[in-house]
Image: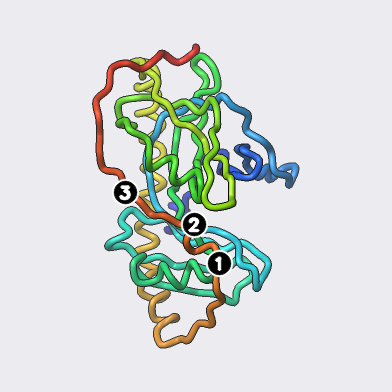
Amino acid sequence: MSKSNPRLTNPASKFIEFKGDSGQFFYFDKETEQKTEVKMPIYFVVLDELSAIKGFNEKHKCGIYSNEIRSIKDDILNVKTFKGGVQIVGKYNDIKDAALREGGKFCKSVYVMLITGKDKYELANFQFHGASFGAWMDKKFNVEKFAIAIEETSQDKKGNVTYTFPVFTKKNLSPDIDKAAIEMDRQLQVYLASYLNQQIEEKISDTEVIENKETEFYPDEHWDNLKVKRNEEKLNMDDSEDLPF
């Protein structure tokens, strides 16, 4: 960052989450300061995927969040609450228990090109955690070769708890949509290159701040609900349907 090269802002227009209790997607509208529903069907093309921690901290009654990283094995997470009082720094495997006890859950941050109509596209971000994260990791197709549709939800049960999750299906990726996605991803990668470089510069000072600092943790009865699964299987399947445009 410099005077003539200021820090870039995230180009995503919406940060979309899924509510497992209601089965709805929503984003926070900064202008109205309200949660706005994103109605299904939803169609998009994946541009990039990163990882983060997010959730809700009961003690401070506020959200908990972290920076976004590419590698949970090698990169440093800096987990904080919006009201302060919590700071956990380290690699995912080293801090995951502490983050979960503070209310933070593993989150897949998926940058996408939303397809809102014929030749109408929008750069957005999905924050998949909880039930939506599990559904995202369980999909059985290569997101680089297909567009993705969310047209319905389904339900499952764990113990006495019934939960809702989105159903991801594949759609044919036309040359025109693929070209538009590549151009949009170029814009995204300029931002991510700057953002991730900034994280590298800051992680040393963040680690020094947290080093030898004792953190008070609180039990999270929902720890068992988090299942971090990595599905690296990529299948080439040709029986998909076209996008409805």
Query: What amino acid is labelled 3 in the image?
Result: Arg
Does 176 sit left or right of 153 as displayed?
left
Please give the name of the residue rendered at 39% of the width and 60% of the height, measured from the top-left corner. 198
Does 188 sit left or right of 245 as displayed?
left
- Report the label total: 3
Looking at the rendering, which quadrant does residue 59 occupy?
bottom right
Compared with 15, 63 (above or below) is below
Name the one closer to the observer, 151 or 4.
151
Please give the name of the residue rendered at 25% of the width and 30% of the height, measured from the top-left corner. 235
Sequence-wise first label, 2 or 3: 2
Name the element at disc 1. loop
Compared with 81, 143 (above or below) is above
Does 62 sit left or right of 149 as displayed?
right
Q: Which mark is residue 221?
A: 1
Q: Which mark is residue 100?
A: none
Closer to the eye: label 1 or 3: 1
Residue 187, image x, y percentages = 40, 37
Query: Within 10 Å of the Cα at label 2, are there few (<14), some (14-19), or many (20+) other Cα atoms?
Result: few
Please give the name of the residue rendered at 55% of the width and 27% of the height, measured from the top-left corner. 152
Q: Which mark is residue 225?
A: 2
Query: What amino acid is labelled 1 in the image?
Result: Glu
Sequence-wise first label, 1 or 3: 1
Q: How is the image coloured?
A: rainbow
Looking at the rendering, which quadrant does residue 23 occupy?
top right
Are circles 2 and 1 on residues that touch, CB within 8 Å? no
Q: Is residue 195 visible?
A: no
* Gap between marks 2 and 1 measured at Cα: 9 Å
* Gap between marks 2 and 3 measured at Cα: 16 Å
Residue 142, image x, y percentages = 30, 31
Q: Which mark is residue 230?
A: 3
Residue 231, image x, y percentages = 30, 44
Query: What amino acid is labelled 2 in the image?
Result: Asn
